[in-house]
Image: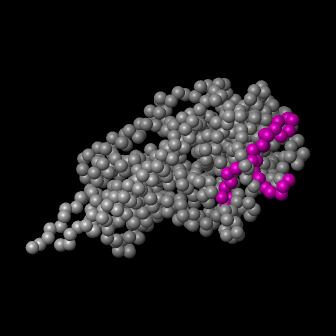
Amino acid sequence: MSRRSAPTSPALSTPATEEREPHAPHRYRARIGALAAGAVPVLAFPVPGQAWLAWVALVPGLLLMQRAPSGREAAVRGWWFGTGFILTAMYWLVPSIGPGLPVLAVLFGALQGAVGYTVHRLLRPQLTARRALLALLVVPAVWVTTEYARSWPALGGPWALLGATQWQHPAILGLASAGGIWLVSAAVAAVNTGVLIALTAVRRRPRAVAAGSVVLVLVSGPLLFALREAPAGDGAVTVALVQPGIVEDPQARFEASARITAGLVGQPVDLVVWGESSTTADLDRDPAALDTLRGLAATTGSEVVAGEDARKADGRISKDAVLVSPTGVVDRYRKIRLVPFGEYIPLRPVLGWIAGVSRAAGENRAPGTSFHVLPTTDRAGAPLPVGALICFESAFPDMSRTAARDGARDGARVLVYQSSTSTFQRTWAPEQHVSLAAIRAAETGRPAVQASLTGVSAAFDAQGRELARLGTDGTGALTVRLPLTAPGTLTWYDRIGDVVPLGALLVTAGAAVAGWRSRGVRRADQLSLPAV
């Protein structure tokens, strides 16, 4: 008498062909395709600036992950996709870290393996409406989780986050005012997931679910922007951003910034901002340099925020934003978040060799210990507290949020970023960098400016709209009138902080647990089947 095998659930069973690994040539063709697909989203970032492309740019890579023969192969394709993304987005780091870039790309790219596995698990054929809904929640959550993981300062910090592609669209940045750049990244990832479902699903219901979700996500940003009350106006201030250009000699660079500032005499300027490393003199110990700045503050009638990159009395080099008035140094902020390899080499005893084959830091800079706003005043002597952050610190949403919430002075009225991108002048880096100031403005509801020695100097209003710009080939003073928001104004993101990435972590963890449990059930069912 023959035995009949028990029926298995189509949702839990896995066809034998799905678990069969392809031959090596085919496997590596797909992986190389995933590596190339990782470069596509970078076209949405500056300089290419095709922001619209971000909403579909993940689809080729996601499709390769979806069609992988197994979850393991999908994870590997996700890894290759992530490697291609990092290599392309940060190619301009080659002068700084040389052969270290491919290593970093492979390490950070591995995080995207989780995206590949998730896409394969939830979106492989035959796709149901239930799995489509789960994918529209879980895939963006996993994407944001990977971005949040590589944004940890010890790993280098948040650069090339998917949401940054939308920096020129204040209506979409309405999402940033509610959930930070993380919510923008989640929205872009969700739309890409929805487009993939709409293109590949056979059944009508999953396609309908995907189409409805895409429309809902696309209108959410503009809807939040329309419903959000415009920041209450409270006057305006005039800020001058000094950009001397590429001047290699430190003293000549200082003198060039001083000459540009002297040209502002007679103009109604409330604050002058110099770029990062605009002086290599320790202003606490160099009376000549300090006297020059004091004189400029006196003749222009405005305080100066200078960028100090100097060896201090303790023998260590640090980067400071120094507020100078006609009476001398008022206050200073020391940079906390240093640039890996650019300003210090992590695990220098092990990785110090990189300095010998690149422009990586020959000596570690000394980081600061805490952040505080600078107690600036305008021409009339009214308080104008500014959150002065230095270069790479503009990439960190939490630092700008801290400036907005500084209780000691009712929060910064203006976000000020000092920068210098001389090493990357002819690359995509300056444009990628300045775009972050627009996002920080939208997140915090405060105007933001970036003053660069070289690179791009620019100003943005409290909703992230660009007001003025001086490009990489420009030199001189960029003077802009900044509308101020009322003291104490806070966006939802200011209030709730990083709820979105924390929620993404919870969703990712829950999905991982559910997947592990269902895998165990499936194995148990397979073991319990009677032999034929």
| Residue located at (75% from left, 27% from top) | 382
Q: Is 384 on the left or on the right of 441, as rendered?
A: right
Q: Which image quarter: residue 115?
A: bottom left
Q: Quadrant of the C terminus?
A: bottom left
Q: Is residue 37 above or below residue 450?
A: below
Please tell me how many numbered marks the rendered image carries.
Answer: 0
| Residue located at (51% from left, 47% from top) | 501
| Residue located at (70% from left, 66% from top) | 348
In this view, which residue lies farthest toward the left?
A: 1
Tell me which segment is drawn in magenta.
313-342
Q: Is 272 on the left or on the right of 65, as rendered?
A: right
Q: Is residue 443 above or below residue 346?
A: above
Choose between 152 and 471: the one closer to the eye. 152
Where residue 70 sits: x, y (%)? 35, 65
Q: Quadrant of the N terminus?
A: bottom left
Q: Is residue 33 above or below residue 227?
A: below
Choose between 11 and 469: the one closer to the eye. 11
Where residue 88 sits: x, y (%)? 53, 59
| Residue located at (65% from left, 25% from top) | 234
